């Protein structure tokens, strides 16, 4: 009888152990699914992480193509619809230049920029140690993204009531397609779903894990079709107007200060960017909460995201630093856009009437700079708060306060990037494309620099390289001091230049 009871107990124990193992397996599978979802949403599918070329393609193809597409959108809209809003197109149209020529020139500039970005990416990647085949396919993917969204921007330039609306529609299309592409890859959707999204065509080129050129043919065809549609729409709308009419403003204004004007001009982008960073915070929070599973399944990530970590907790902390730096780079785009709007207001002859009143140049610039610095800072904090909530429920050796402090430490680097755009707009607005240099350098050095093991002096050109890991060493604030000093210097240069230069 005792033997039978002992056998029953052993059987029950085995059943409980099997049940516990099954539960643990389910939790592990769930964590891996969350990890895959977060990774796919941000970087796309990882086809090959065993080589530097494969890792570089996974880490840069989606985000690099996104950046080139943004550049193409701004170039096409600014050179086509932006000229109509400023009156420059009317002056050109009074001569021998036809209406179709302006749009053709804008599209050509957008495509040319995309080609240059693609070629430069391929060549620089090769010089840094990448193979020719994979590097050229990667660069061609960037070019394809730019060409497609040059076509999208050409169409939205005919739809929007002004240049800003046209840009917003095109950027919204890019953002929706980007998230949809990542989501479908993350949930292991059927393979045909990757072919209904134009961004999926670029992903399916698979640099370093296939080097397929054929999907780019579809991108070229789409770009040609979109440009043809844009020319057709242009012939059916009024000059200076869009197919969607603008809503009239109030009969009497109520703004009484330059800061109030800056808030009014930037309140809609501020709301949109804040909402976007809540979503980014959720994605990054899932990403960070699953960091241990991510590194366990992909050891190659450890060397890049958190190189030099001495313990698992240090590894998680360094990972948070990298993710918040990425959030800071994205947030700096908003600040640079705000400063470029200052120049747009000048070219549209709306700044001069304001400055003809009691408003000083310094006061006018200061109000816009405060918005350019404030909105990105709020966005980074929003992402940090959402990430902190996820981290507080994960066993990473970090708490909510650590993530918030790290987000605060990232803000000076964001301000340094924006301060460079202030210096450009304040002193040499004719070359305002240079105002994006800080964003581009930070993106390239932060995402690609560690992959190819660039020296510290090269990585140091990115202000985000100097952001300390406050959870590991909260006393190491020398880097923040240096980038803060550079930010103040750029702000001073921009202020002096804006005070002295001519206003169009």
Image (tube, helix red, strand yellow):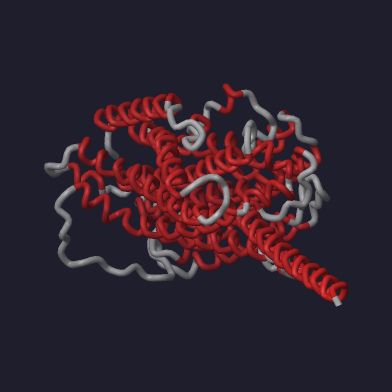
Instruction: Give the residue at x 22% y 48%.
Output: 259
Position in image of residue 79 (x %, y %): 47, 49
Check the image and report above or below for 357 versus 492: below
**Do we see residue 437 in this rendering?**
no
**Do we see residue 409 in this rendering?**
yes
The N terminus - image quarter: bottom right
Position in image of residue 163 (x %, y %): 41, 56
Residue placed most toward the observer, 10 or 64: 10
Position in image of residue 503 (x %, y %): 27, 37
Check the image and report above or below for 230 versus 408: below
Name, please, the residue furthest toward the top.
457
Instruction: Give the residue at x 63% y 64%.
Output: 183
In the shown orientation, is residue 256 left or right of residue 116?
left
Instruction: Give the residue at x 65% y 56%.
Output: 35
Position in image of residue 219 (x %, y %): 69, 58
Check the image and report above or below for 331 versus 124: below
In the shown orientation, is residue 62 left or right of residue 173?
right
Res 455 → quadrant: top right
Name, please, the residue furthest toward the left.
358
């Amino acid at each position: 009888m005792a033997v039978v009871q002992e056998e029953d107990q052993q059987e029950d124990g085995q059943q409980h152990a099997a049940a516990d193992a099954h539960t643990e397996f389910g939790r592990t599978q769930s964590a891996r699914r969350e990890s895959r979802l977060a990774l796919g949403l941000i970087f796309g599918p990882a086809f090959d992480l065993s080589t530097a070329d494969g890792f570089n393609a996974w880490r840069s193809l989606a985000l690099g193509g996104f950046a080139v597409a943004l550049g193409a959108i701004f170039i096409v809209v600014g050179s086509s619809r932006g000229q109509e809003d400023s009156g420059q197109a009317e002056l050109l149209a009074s001569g021998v230049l036809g209406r179709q020529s302006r749009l053709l020139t804008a599209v050509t500039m957008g495509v040319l920029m995309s080609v240059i970005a693609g070629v430069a990416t391929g060549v620089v990647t090769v010089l840094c140690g990448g193979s020719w085949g994979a590097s050229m396919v990667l660069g061609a993917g960037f070019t394809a993204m730019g060409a497609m969204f040059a076509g999208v921007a050409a169409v939205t330039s005919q739809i929007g009531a002004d240049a800003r609306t046209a840009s917003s529609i095109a950027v919204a299309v890019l953002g929706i397609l980007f998230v949809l592409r990542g989501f479908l890859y993350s949930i292991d959707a059927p393979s045909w779903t990757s072919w209904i999204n134009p961004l999926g065509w670029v992903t399916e080129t698979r640099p370093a894990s296939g080097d397929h050129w054929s999907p780019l043919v579809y991108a070229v065809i789409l770009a040609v079709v979109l440009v043809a549609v844009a020319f057709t729409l242009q012939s059916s709308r009024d000059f200076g107007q869009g197919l969607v009419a603008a809503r009239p403003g109030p009969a009497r204004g109520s703004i009484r200060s330059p800061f109030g004007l800056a808030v009014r001009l930037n309140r809609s982008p501020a709301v949109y960017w804040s909402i976007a960073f809540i979503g980014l915070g959720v994605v990054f929070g899932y990403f960070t909460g699953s960091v241990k599973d991510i590194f366990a399944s992909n050891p190659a990530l450890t060397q890049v995201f958190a190189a030099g970590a001495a313990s698992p907790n240090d590894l998680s902390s360094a990972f948070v630093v990298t993710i918040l730096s990425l959030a800071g780079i994205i947030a700096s785009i908003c600040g640079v856009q705000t400063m470029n709007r200052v120049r747009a207001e000048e070219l549209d002859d709306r700044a001069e009437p304001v400055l003809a009143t009691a408003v000083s140049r310094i006061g006018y610039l200061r109000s816009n700079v405060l918005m350019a610095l404030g909105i990105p800072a709020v966005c980074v904090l929003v992402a940090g708060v959402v990430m902190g909530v996820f981290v507080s429920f994960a066993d990473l050796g970090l708490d909510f306060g650590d993530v918030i402090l790290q987000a605060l430490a990232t803000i000076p680097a964001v301000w340094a990037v924006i301060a460079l755009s202030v210096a450009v707009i304040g002193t040499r607005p004719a070359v305002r494309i240079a105002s994006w240099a800080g964003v581009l350098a930070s993106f390239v050095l932060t995402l690609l620099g560690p992959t190819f093991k660039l020296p510290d002096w090269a990585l140091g050109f990115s202000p985000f390289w100097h952001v300390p890991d406050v959870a590991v060493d909260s006393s190491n604030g020398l880097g923040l001091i240096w980038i803060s000093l550079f930010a103040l210097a750029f702000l001073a240069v921009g202020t002096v230049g804006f005070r002295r230069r001519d206003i169009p």
